[in-house]
Amino acid sequence: MTRIFDSFMFGRELDMLECRLVELEPVKNLVHVIVEARVDHQDHPKPLYFAEHRERFAPWADRIVHVVADRFRGPYETRRERLVWRRQKAHQPGTAEGSHQVEGREGHLSRTERSGSIM
């Protein structure tokens, strides 16, 4: 069976996530890979919002892989503007990790999202 992965970084957009899950529900064999970090892109601590509200998304639990991106923190530079993008880029490998957590990786299609744009 071919699976399609909808991989994206998640901050605190709970309502948007619910809309996404509802709209994509008819797509068969779709797995949502939610990548979330304990810090935002400015390195401010934040809770794991998806984990705290997991019960809200119970109807889609069999289609969701939640990846905590703690270990993807990359090297930082001194200029603040570049730090933000470095942190975001450092979290992106989590989208691939989610697909590796799903059994039978052969024959999959992937859609990744970066900064709100579909790649």
Image (cartoon, rainbow, N blue to C red):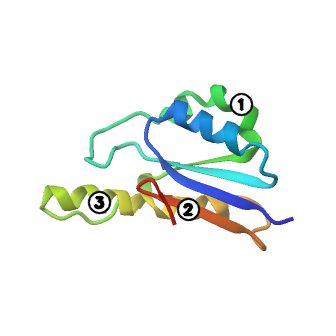
> Depth check: 100 or 107 in front?
107
Which amino acid type is shown beneath numbered disc 3? Trp
Q: Which structural element holds mark 3?
A: helix
Q: Residue 54 in the image: state x and y as whole percent.
A: 61, 31
Which amino acid type is shown beneath numbered disc 1? Ala
Disc 3: CA contacts within 10 A as few (<14), some (14-19) or many (>=20): some
Q: Residue at x 23, y 63 (%)?
A: 76
Disc 2: CA contacts within 10 A as few (<14), some (14-19) or many (>=20): some
Q: Nearer the viewer, mark 1 or mark 2?
A: 2
Q: Which mark is residue 58?
A: 1
When the figure is inspected, residue 88 is found, relative to residue 57, above or below; the finding is below
Q: Give the residue at mark 3.
A: 85
* Cα–Cα gap, marks 1 and 2: 23 Å
Q: Which structural element holds mark 2?
A: strand
Q: Is residue 95 left or right of residue 45?
A: right
Circle nearer the N terminus (1, 2): 1
* Cα–Cα gap, marks 3 and 1: 32 Å
When the figure is inspected, residue 26 is found, relative to residue 14, above or below; the finding is below
Circle nearer the N terminus (2, 3): 3
Q: Residue at x 65, y 50 (%)?
A: 32
Q: Residue at x 48, y 33 (%)?
A: 49
Instruction: Name the residue at the right extreme.
Output: 1
Q: Residue at x 44, y 53 (%)?
A: 116
Q: Give the residue at mark 2.
A: 112
Quadrant where the N terminus sits is bottom right
> Depth check: 6 or 54 in front?
6
* Cα–Cα gap, marks 2 and 3: 17 Å
Q: Hey, which quadrant is residue 89 in on the image?
A: bottom left
Q: Residue 78 in the image: state x and y as whole percent.
A: 12, 62
